[in-house]
Image: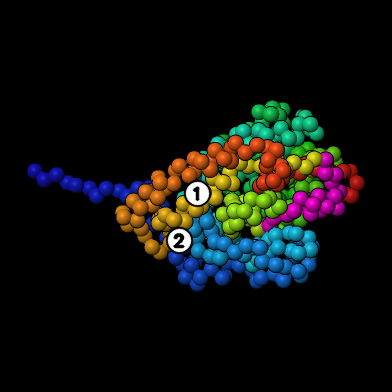
Amino acid sequence: MRVAHTKPRPPRRTQAIAQARPAYEAELKAGTAHFFHPRSTQCPWCRSPRLHPRLHTTDLLQHKPGDFHLDHCQDCGHIFQNPRLNTEGLAFYYRDFYDGLGEKNTAGMFAGRTTTYRRRAQALTPHAPDPRTWLDVGTGHGHFCATAQTVYPHTAFDGLDFTDGAELAEQAGRVRHGHRGSFPDLAPTINGHYDVVSMFHYLEHSEQPDRELQAAHQALRPGGHLLIEVPDPASRYARLLGRRWLPWLQPQHLHFIPAQNLRQRLTTLGFTVIAEHHVEAHDRVDLLAATWFTIDAIAPRDEAPWRTERPGRLKKTARAAVVIAGIPALIAATVLDKVMPRFLIRRLELSNAYRIIARREATGD
């Protein structure tokens, strides 16, 4: 009697990569130039033509093909991606990062940041101890809202995201309503509805940050509060670590707004800035991320549908060996990130982010 042998099925990730490869190959056939707008000759924040190159880098996280440039405005200090990704480019580079092949890792990372989310929510307590309604813009899968609910148990939390994350957050019960789409497009339908609007590491992803701020003013009732947290381009780590500074996050981050610029723009729109936090907004990951980027650059590339080369067993083994050898360095970097005293972060201006809390005034409607 002959025993029938079935061919083992490839791992699920390998199947997903194989299924995604034809679409990536088709998009990349013409190169990457079609993913960008024409290069801008003026600053998008102040319209100054005095631009200077700030950074040239590649995609250090997914290693998708392409070169990305950041320019620095010599008049207002704004830093922005130039040329900037167009709609097609944003779709290409976001794909399989927060969803698809990258969804599991990304969701796990955000779900494990409960302490950070709680601190962000508590930052508002001295100014608005019991808001009724709260809209979290760029909510992802709603993990911040779920944590903030423990700080404000009587508050109704809604979320908005341009992916299906907000809808999934509603299904999971992390938000009351999950809106999918553009905040400027949604704002007229929720005019004056919210006591709080939060934008945690959202503005840097936006194509037009000023429109997002106008939308926040429209969505808030008079006396309501806006919480914004963004990368701080003035961080000394940005200069020390260069392209391996995690908050550069190319190609996703399009704008880096100096705190002074954001304060001035909020005031112009009819807000009063009532608090500004730097050390409190710092995320202790700079050295760890830079170390990982270094190790990852040494190791052979992992398999992905946007890469034509498919690593064999030898390269996969070599990658694993390099990563394992780098574990002591990763541990050391993690420890240094965690034990850095707050006073030293403040004195050396190392904070990689800042947070602004602003109150919407009744005037200027």
Residue 139 vs residue 84, the one in the foreground: 84
Q: Secondary structure at mark 1?
A: helix
Residue 309 vs residue 236, the one in the foreground: 236
Residue for point 76% across, 64% down:
74
CA separation, marks 1 and 2?
Answer: 21 Å
Label 2: few (<14), some or many (≥20) within 10 Å? Answer: many
Residue for point 85% across, 50% down:
267
Q: Secondary structure at mark 2?
A: loop
Q: Which residues are magenta?
A: 255-274
Amino acid tagged 2 = Trp
Quadrant, the N terminus = top left
Q: Position of residue 37 (x, y in %)?
A: 64, 68
Residue for point 63% across, 42% down:
283
Between label 1 and label 2, give the one nearer the viewer: 1
Which label belongs to residue 162? Answer: none
Q: Position of residue 264 (x, y in %)?
A: 83, 52
Residue 110 as seen in the image, left or right of residue 272: left
Residue 35 appears in the rendering: yes
**Disc with the residue nearer the chain's start (1 vs 2):** 1
Label 1: few (<14), some or many (≥20) within 10 Å? Answer: many
Residue that label 2 marks: 306
Count of all numbered marks drawn on residues in the image:
2
Residue 327 vs residue 205, the one in the foreground: 327
Q: Quadrant of residue 82?
A: bottom right
Q: Is residue 54 magenta?
A: no
Check whether the beta carbons of the residues at disc 1 and disc 2 lie within 8 A of each other: no
Residue that label 1 marks: 292
Residue for point 91% across, 46% down:
363
Q: Position of residue 41 (x, y in %)?
A: 72, 71
Residue 214 appears in the rendering: no
